[in-house]
Image (cartoon, grey):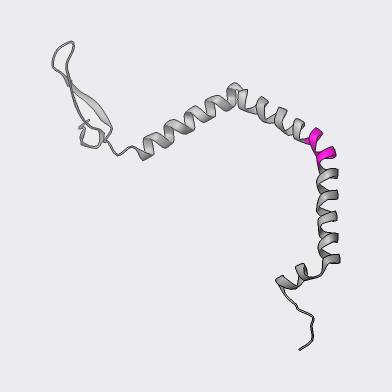
Amino acid sequence: MSGRMYGADSYWEEPERMLRLIIGVAAGYVLGAKAGRARYEQISKTTRAVAASPVTRKLVQVSRQKLSDRLNTQPRLEPMEPIDERTTVLVPQDQLRR
């Protein structure tokens, strides 16, 4: 066998390759940070505007209610017959005769 290794471990065995990788990662980080800050601010501003929108809030409210209704294990109750002003008999919706 030769002294040369192949595979994941061999990459880290050669100091030149590791140094090139570290320099590449550092350069990418620095360049991305300079160009990325403006883009980050743009995305952040848009996200806040969408989240604060009345349309988005209504959509979230309706979606939560629909999800809650579907996940609810309790039967939906409907009034069947009022007994007096303060008391009404409730029955599950699927058992209500109309």
Report the residue that reaches farthest toward the bottom.
1
> What residue is shown at x 86% (from left), y 44% (from top)?
31
Q: In this rendered view, identify the residue nearer to me: 19 or 70.
A: 19
Picture quadrant of residue 34:
top right
Q: Position of residue 94 (x, y in %)?
A: 24, 37
Q: Position of residue 26 (x, y in %)?
A: 82, 50
Please name whichever residue, 46 or 81, is drawn nearer the observer in this view of the structure: 46
The correct choice, above or below, for 67 with respect to 4 in the image is above
Please give the range of residues in magenta.
33-39
Left or right: 45 as drawn, with respect to 22: left
Asked whether residue 14 is drawn in magenta, I would say: no
The residue furthest left is: 83
Relative vertical location of residue 18 with respect to residue 74 in this rendering, above or below: below
Q: Quadrant of the C terminus?
A: top left
Q: Residue at x 79, y 80 (%)?
A: 4
Query: Is residue 27 placed above or below 67 in the rendered structure?
Result: below
Image location of residue 96, percent across then percent down: 21, 32
